[in-house]
Amino acid sequence: MKINVTKYMKMFITISLIIIFTGLLFVIFRGFNQGIDFTGGTLIQIDFGEKKSVDELREITDTLDKNASIVHAGDDRSQVIIRTSKSMENDERLEFFKLFKEKFNLSDEALINQKKFEPSIGGETQLKALVSVIIATIFMLIYISIRFEFRFGIAAIVALLHDVLISVAVYAIFKLPLNSSFIAAILTIVGYSINDTIVVFDRIRENVKGMRKATFEDIVNTSVGQTVRRSINTSITTLMAIAALYIFGVESIKDFALPLIIGVLAGTYSSIFIASPTWYFLSTRKSKVNRYNANKIK
């Protein structure tokens, strides 16, 4: 498959920048939709005596908080744990329970637990997640620089940051709630998205040795064309598995699957249209000859 990524690299990069800056504008003027893991809130646990569907319960919880978390509990899944980002006093919590009591004809004993809770993701946890991403990025840069060369490492990190920023921008634009599952998914994306990029870079390295008289454009476009089917097929099979989790999983699983879907899509795009063109840009920026010195490749 022939793909001229170097000819249209400005268009591909512009598309990504538009999404990222749009997300940034939404963050500045509207802020993130921080989930209950960040804000704290109220927990109410109710025993309905039989399993109730999430849609039935949403008719009540949406009147208070459309992002409320609903998790079934108990051996027969008849209990429900509801967590909302709204911090309610005792009287308010009892009034909230009264809505369920009247709709489902419950007794007062059905209310098993009710309390306010503090944020599970505090400043320290956010800092540790950021430090984890930075450390992982540094080690990836060192490894790729040793295994390939420094410019490959820079291009891979640019693609990696692209995937993370696209995911954050989509969450900001659509006001999706940020929670602990989102943080875990972002850390997973950081580890996953580098894979396809390495495959393309490995093919570039092989082609540099075999195409000694070829230009940078020919090497990059040939390498991307040789690996694009593999990248797309790998991503499709991965997305099928994640989509199944999102469709059939419980809410907590969906919270983890959604950012993964966004991250895999962004990773596939960046491995084809961002990483290699970035390496091409870095390689031709100061080079007087439009050919690569194959002796520099390890």
Image (cartoon, grey):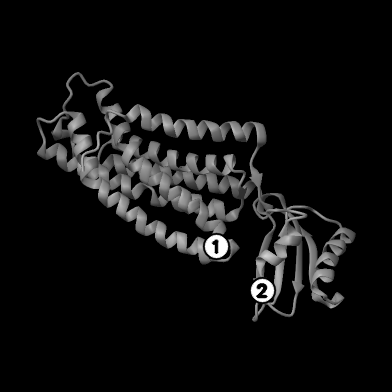
Residue contact at pointers 2 and 1, CB within 8 angstroms: no
Q: Earlier in the sequence, mark 2 or mark 1?
A: 2
Q: In the orientation shown, which residue stands out farthest toward the right?
A: 91
Q: Residue at x 22, y 36 (%)?
A: 221
Decide which of 39, 80 is in the foreground and name it: 80
Q: Amino acid at mark 1?
A: Ile
Q: Position of residue 49 (x, y in %)?
A: 74, 80
From what the image shows, is residue 221 above or below residue 140?
above
Which residue position holds label 2? 73
- Quadrant location of the C terminus? top left
Around disc 2, counting alpha carbons within 10 Å, would you say few (fewer than 14), some (14 to 19), or many (20 or more)? some
Q: How many discs appear? A: 2
Q: Residue at x 27, y 46 (%)?
A: 228
Image quadrant in which you'd find residue 79 = bottom right
Q: Residue at x 66, y 71 (%)?
A: 72
Which residue position holds label 1? 253
Q: CA distance from mark 2 to mark 1?
A: 15 Å
Around disc 1, counting alpha carbons within 10 Å, would you say few (fewer than 14), some (14 to 19), or many (20 or more)? some
Identify the secondary structure beneath mark 1. helix
- Quadrant location of the N terminus? top left
Q: Residue at x 76, y 61 (%)?
A: 60
Q: Position of residue 156 (x, y in %)?
A: 35, 40
Q: Position of residue 278 (x, y in %)?
A: 32, 32
Q: Is residue 153 visible?
A: no
